[in-house]
Amino acid sequence: MLIAKVIGTVVSTQKEPALEGLRFMLCRPVNAKGEESGAVVVAADAVGAGLGEMILYATGSSARQTIATENRPVDAVIMAIVDQWEVEGETKYLKSEDS
């Protein structure tokens, strides 16, 4: 799994029927310190993530292992919303009450 911040949404009215019902989000990968680290990823949202939230996502064949994406042609899926993370005992991220 990888960590990222949800920075936007993708709307597609014309798509493969197997993708119907999926919501797509733009996710910017971050490193353990919360700093941007890589290209933006479009991921199917399996958990109801919102803009600005930190999430865990999977890519490749692992992206097709959730109930929402099973046997669907997706290459990335949001599979968890992060509440907090620590690195060497130091809190690097704590989801605010407002998120």
Image (cartoon, rainbow, N blue to C red):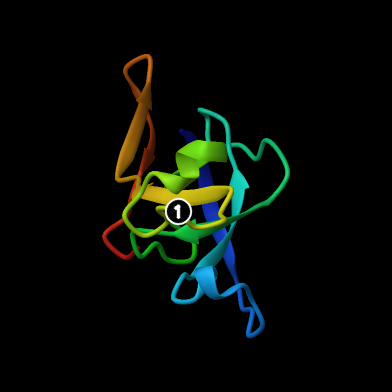
Side of 25 relative to 40 (left or right): left
> Quarter holding the C terminus?
bottom left
Q: Secondary structure at mark 1?
A: loop
Q: Position of residue 38 (x, y in %)?
A: 71, 38
Residue sitting at x 26%, y 60%: 97
- Residue appearing at x 55%, y 63% in the figure: 25
33 sits left or right of 40 in the view:
left
Of all residues, the one furthest to the left in this rendering is 97
Camera-nearest residue between 22 and 56? 22
Q: Residue at x 55, y 75 (%)?
A: 17
| Quadrant in the picture for residue 69 | bottom left
Q: Look at mark 1 in the image and give the residue it sits on.
A: 71
Residue 23: x and y in percent read 48, 70
How many circles with numbers are drawn on the protein?
1
Task: Specify whether 75 is left or right of 2.
Answer: right
Amino acid at circle 1: Asn
Rendered residue at 31%/55% (across/down): 67
Which is nearer the eye, 45 or 6? 45
Closer to the camera, 71 or 78? Answer: 71
Q: Is residue 16 above or below residue 70?
A: below
In the current view of this chain or complex, which residue is farthest to the top?
A: 88
On screen, 13 above or below 94? below
Answer with the quarter of the image where residue 60 lies.
top right
Q: Where residue 56 sits in the image (x, y, percent)?
A: 43, 42
**Dot 1 surroundings within 10 Å: few (below 14), some, or many (20 or more)?**
few
Residue found at the far bottom of this picture? 13
Q: Position of residue 64 (x, y in %)?
A: 45, 47
Which of these two is toward me, 58 or 54? 58
